Structures are given as structure tokens and as C-alpha cells.
Image (cartoon, rainbow, N blue to C red):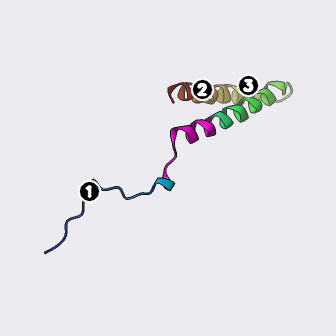
Amino acid sequence: MATEKDIDAADWTDQDLLTRDEAGERLVEEIEATRAHLSELESRTDDPNAPASMEMTRRRLIAMENLQESL
């Protein structure tokens, strides 16, 4: 007779989880780094690629800030 596996049983440990607090802390750090990067891009007046990079960075920043509000 084969033993049945409990599919509802957890197959992970608490150490494997990223808590909301930890995720929030990492997100805050990433937002700060992205803001610094955006400031750096904004200071580049001679770089023809800067406007496109700034737009992508702004979109990323907005997405992260929206996510932060939901945590």
C-alpha cells in the first residue's frame, strides 16, 4: 500500500520566505538607488541616449513606488 503525500503540506521552511517587511526594506533601497541613477541621468546633458534612459528609469521608479504603497 502506497502512502499518500499530503499536497497541502508545506515543503519549505521559514528561512526560505521573504517577509513583507524584508521585501519593503529591499524595495526602499532599490527606490533610493533608482532615484540616484535618475539624478545622474538628468545631469548628463551631452548624452544623446539620456532622454530614453531617463524615461525608462522614471517608469521603473513609478512602478516601484506604486508597489511600495501596496505593501
Foreground label between 3 and 1 = 1
Q: CA distance from mark 3 to mark 1?
A: 51 Å
Q: Secondary structure at mark 3?
A: helix
Residue at 82% over, 30% down = 47
Q: CA distance from mark 1 to mark 2?
A: 36 Å
Task: For label 3, count other residues whose C-alpha is less than 10 Å away and answer few (under 14), some (14-19) or many (20+).
Answer: some
> Which label's residue is closer to the chain start, 3 or 1?
1
Q: Secondary structure at mark 1?
A: loop
* Left or right: 10 as drawn, with respect to 39: left
The amino acid sitting under disc 2 is: Glu
For the residue pair 1 and 37, the one nearer the viewer reads as 1
Task: For label 2, count other residues whose C-alpha is less than 10 Å away and answer few (under 14), some (14-19) or many (20+).
Answer: some
Tell me if label 3 and label 1 are in contact, CB under 8 Å.
no
Q: CA distance from mark 2 to mark 3?
A: 21 Å
Residue 7, labelled with which disc? 1
Residue at 19% over, 70% down = 3
> Which label's residue is closer to the chain start, 1 or 2?
1
For the residue pair 14 and 57, the one nearer the viewer reads as 14
Residue at 76% over, 28% down = 50
- What is the magenta segment's predominant secondary structure? helix
The residue wearing badge 3 is 51
The span shown in magenta is: 17-27
Residue 51 within the magenta-colored segment of the rendering: no
Question: Where residue 2 appears, x then y in whole percent?
Answer: 17, 73
Foreground label between 1 and 2 = 1
> Which label's residue is closer to the chain start, 2 or 3?
3
Tell me if label 2 and label 3 are in contact, CB under 8 Å.
no
Residue at 26% over, 56% down = 7
